[in-house]
């Protein structure tokens, strides 16, 4: 068949998507199968997608004047039959679609977890993610739930795309499609885009994931530096005229406008109102320099780290604790009385193995009255006893260069592993909601071109959890940038921190490092469950032909898939790996 003539065997160059068993099928059998799939998508399944009936029996019924009740029954039957056929066609390697699971059994994932009622929302997503991964270890013979017409239509669209791209047997591409939104599927069905099956650097699944990411990022402010007005302009979709007007305001007037404008007022009227308010000095930094240039003065607040002096400041994922020391000294020099809470994801024994100076660093923090906690998962602090009673006390939170850990054989952008990075940000910001003071700031440093934790994961996760994006500051302009950066894994054993010259971590261009700044602005409205990126199922891992799976077969392939799945379960349980 012409649409399979480009496939290569698993031992040949370029193979990424066709398992050996499929190569043994006859060409006639494959043609018949594809023809049937195309018939489903273009025939009955189109009834589900478009609400249009092309079945001859239904057309005849319409001509003969069948009553509405019989007509509805006939349409429902066609929808059910088409959905069943498409669902059977896609059972080879797929799982439930998009972000939300179909079989959570209500709140089963919360059973046996000791968490206070008001903190359930902060940890529910993390526990649900663990439940999704653990379900692969349960009874595989359990009966599948009946799909709704919407879900059947969704599967029809996915199958249509896979047939269109000649990638029906690629389990990883199917997985990526199943994590798409319905709107994204519709866009791809109408477009002529197709993953390059002969790309020598990236497999089709990774190209598809990147294409979807580019689609989403077109609606975002970008990962480069943004001042306070540029971030404000993007949030409210203001034009260049308003942008120019805002840049002419003084510090007092600009701060007033940024604080009280919610999109419903007339911006010009609010600016005139700000000008009528007299400047006053209440001995706080926010009222300093009222007549200074507005956007420049606001930028200095973020760069000089002028945070709430009374509130606690938490640092997450600070492997060698050099940033926490830097922050503690900064707060002492400004006379702050709020505590610094320094945390590491690793245990103390692991830190001592990697950083010979760790005990000295802990002693330095103790002298500054800082708290040091180890084995802290920033997505699960709601069930960490050490954070009990800290609700609403954080005035500032820092998370520098977040990463979920590298997995040998996969680039960070590959969909088999990239879901971990996206969920890290989503669950991090949801967990913070219960511990932040309204108006508190969160700063996440990352490289604008990072392919693991993308800037869009950071900004998007913050916004959906009611953290306003207020500015993006170049990392090298940040007052706290001089600390000993590290890899945060076993590589640090041989690469010592160099806080003086900041050369301990040279994997990224320093001029592309950014600090994404957010302010917590709760509205009081319920947010619903935190959306999470669906992880690949064990079945998908076993049918993956990318990365380390490329040249594995039989028991070796199954063993690697099980090991990788076990690692995923361990990671989402808050246990350090690597």
Image: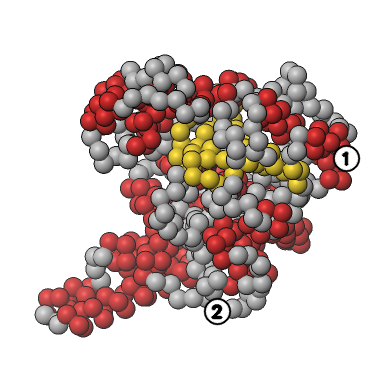
- For the point 53% across and 40% down, the residue is 440
Q: Visible in this render: residue 483?
A: yes
Q: Which of the two discs, 1 and 2, labels the residue nearer the N terminus?
A: 2
Query: Looking at the image, which residue is at 80% across and 38% down?
Result: 366
Q: Is residue 53 above or below residue 205?
A: below
Which residue occupies the foreground of this view, 321 or 338? 338
- Residue at 55% over, 71% down: 107
Which residue is under mark 2? 143
Horizontal relation, residue 147 to residue 68: left or right: right
Q: Residue 59 in the image: x percent, y percent?
A: 18, 73
Question: Quick check: 437 above or below 151?
Answer: above
Element under label 2? loop
Left or right: where 324 falls relative to 234: right
Near-viewer residue (465 or 406): 465
Which residue bears the numbered disc 1? 353
Task: Report the side of 397 relative to 253 (left or right).
Answer: right
Point 30% across, 31% down: residue: 238
Label 1–label 2 contact, CB within 8 A: no
Q: CA distance from mark 1 to mark 2?
A: 48 Å
Q: Image quadrant of residue 493?
A: top right
| Colour scheme employed for the rendering of this structure | secondary structure
Specify whether residue 454 is in view: no
* Quadrant of the rendered image containing residue 105: bottom right
x then y, percent, for residue 574: 70, 55
* Mark 1 residue element: helix
């Amino acid at each position: 068949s012409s649409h399979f003539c480009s496939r290569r065997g698993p031992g040949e160059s370029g193979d990424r998507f066709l398992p050996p068993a499929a190569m043994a099928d006859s060409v006639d059998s494959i043609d018949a199968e594809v023809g049937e799939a195309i018939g489903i998508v273009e025939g009955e399944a189109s009834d589900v997608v478009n609400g249009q009936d092309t079945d001859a029996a239904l057309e005849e019924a319409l001509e003969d004047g069948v009553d509405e009740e019989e007509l509805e029954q006939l349409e429902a039957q066609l929808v059910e039959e088409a959905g069943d056929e498409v669902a059977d066609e896609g059972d080879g390697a797929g799982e439930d679609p998009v972000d939300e699971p179909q079989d959570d059994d209500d709140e089963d994932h919360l059973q046996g977890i000791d968490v206070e009622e008001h903190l359930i929302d902060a940890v529910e997503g993390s526990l649900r993610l663990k439940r999704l991964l653990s379900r692969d270890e349960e009874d595989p013979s359990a009966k599948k739930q009946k799909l709704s017409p919407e879900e059947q239509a969704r599967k029809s669209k996915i199958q249509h795309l896979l047939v269109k791209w000649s990638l029906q047997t690629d389990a990883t591409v199917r997985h990526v499609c199943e994590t798409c939104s319905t709107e994204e599927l519709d866009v791809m069905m109408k477009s002529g885009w197709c993953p390059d099956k002969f790309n020598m650097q990236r497999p089709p699944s990774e190209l598809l994931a990147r294409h979807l990411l580019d689609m989403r990022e077109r609606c975002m402010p970008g990962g480069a530096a943004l001042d306070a007005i540029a971030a404000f302009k993007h949030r409210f979709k203001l034009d260049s005229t308003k942008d120019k007007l805002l840049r002419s305001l003084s510090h007092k007037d600009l701060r007033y406008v940024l604080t009280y404008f919610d999109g419903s007022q007339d911006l010009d009227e609010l600016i005139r109102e700000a000008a009528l308010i007299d400047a006053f000095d209440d001995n706080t930094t926010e009222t300093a320099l009222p007549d200074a240039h507005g956007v420049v003065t606001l930028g200095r607040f973020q760069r000089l780290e002028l945070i709430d002096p009374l509130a606690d400041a938490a640092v997450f994922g600070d492997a060698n604790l050099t940033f926490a020391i830097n922050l503690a000294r900064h707060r002492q020099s400004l006379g702050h009385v709020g505590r610094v809470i320094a945390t590491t994801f690793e245990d103390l024994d692991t830190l001592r193995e990697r950083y010979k100076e760790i005990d000295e660093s802990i002693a330095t923090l103790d002298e500054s009255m800082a708290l040091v906690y180890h084995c802290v998962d920033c997505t699960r602090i709601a069930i960490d006893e050490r954070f009990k009673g800290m609700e609403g006390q954080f005035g500032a939170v820092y998370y520098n260069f977040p990463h979920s850990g590298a997995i040998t054989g996969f680039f960070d952008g590959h969909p088999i592993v990239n879901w971990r990075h996206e969920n890290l940000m989503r669950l991090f910001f949801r967990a913070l909601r219960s511990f932040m003071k309204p108006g508190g700031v969160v700063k996440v440093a990352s490289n604008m071109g990072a392919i693991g934790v993308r800037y869009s994961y950071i900004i998007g996760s913050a916004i959906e959890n009611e953290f306003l994006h207020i500015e993006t500051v170049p990392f090298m302009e940040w007052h706290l940038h001089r600390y000993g950066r590290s890899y945060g894994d076993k590589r640090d054993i041989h690469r010592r921190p160099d806080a003086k010259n900041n050369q301990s971590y040279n994997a990224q261009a320093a001029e592309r490092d950014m600090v994404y700044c957010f302010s917590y602005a709760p509205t009081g409205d319920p947010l619903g469950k935190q959306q999470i990126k669906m992880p690949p199922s064990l079945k998908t891992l076993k049918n993956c032909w990318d990365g380390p799976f490329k040249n594995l077969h039989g028991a070796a392939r199954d063993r690697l898939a099980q090991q990788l799945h076990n690692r995923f379960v361990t990671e989402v349980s808050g246990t350090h790996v690597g």
